[in-house]
Amino acid sequence: MPEHTDLADVLLSLRGVWDEVAVDELDHALQSAARAMEDGADDELVLAAALHDIAHSPLMPAGPAHDLLAREWLTPRYGQRVGWLAGAHVAAKRYLAATVPGYRLSAISERSLQHQGGAAVDPAFVDHPWWPDALRLRHYDDAAKDPGAVGATVEQVLEVARRVRVSRDPDPDAAR
């Protein structure tokens, strides 16, 4: 399958892809972005929150670890921080499960945690300067599984993505 690079196509392809019971992956992405916006997150964190599960898209190449695939896809397009934050969301889940008494996951997230190695603290992540934002992203992720919650719009996410691209490359033609 050829790699798709158009964010709108990849994002919209998440409609009808179910990893959770309550919301599909598009609603999950848009709710994650909305939770980040409500928290006052900067554009890179909002974009990472929206796209942390982008590897679930049927337009993306299949692979064993969706967090790593997201990081590999996002980094060249939106920069090191966006890719790193999206790629750290599983490590953040593992960390919170290991260190926060009573940390609650959805039933599906609980099952996937076991496949992802279980609760653990990975020093390669927790010692990173962006780690606090990875934990913020994880909380947005956890809060984005509500069928009644309002999410951001696809247009809002695409505008955030455009701003992140422009901030990385001041050439306006590069953001197209």
Image (spheres, grey):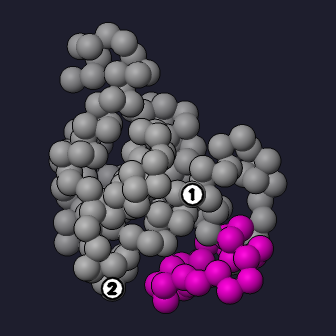
Judged by depth in the image, the label closer to the viewer, 1 or 2, is: 1
The amino acid pointed to by label 2 is Val
Q: Is residue 94 visible?
A: yes
Give how far across and how far down residue 89 sits, in percent.
56, 59
Residue 65 visible, this angle: no
SS at mark 1? Answer: helix
Q: Determine whether the residue tagged by mark 2 lies in a helix, strand or loop.
A: loop
Image location (x, y in percent) of residue 73: 42, 42
Q: Where residue 136 is drawn, which disc sits there?
A: 1
Which residue does the image show at 26% across and 56% down from the upper left?
152
User: Closest to the observer: 160 or 61?
Assistant: 160
- The structure residue drawn at horizontal position 55% and vertical position 63%, both measured from the top left corner, is 138
Kind of residue at disc 1: Arg
N-terminal of the pair, mark 1 or mark 2, is: 2
Instruction: Answer whether residue 96 is magenta in the image.
Output: yes
- Residue 90, label in figure: none
Q: Nearer the viewer, residue 4 or 9?
A: 9
**Where does label 2 land, which residue?**
21
Quadrant assignment, res 151: bottom left
Q: Does residue 154 lie above or below 43 as drawn?
A: below
Q: Position of residue 39 (x, y in %)?
A: 47, 55
Residue found at x 40% / y 60%: 35
Neighbor class of circle 1 (other Cα within 10 Å; few <14, some 14-19, many 20+) is many
Bounds of the magenta segment:
94-117
Magenta stretch holds residue 59: no
Q: Residue at x 39, y 70 (%)?
A: 144
Q: Distance from label 1 to label 2 (Cα)? A: 23 Å
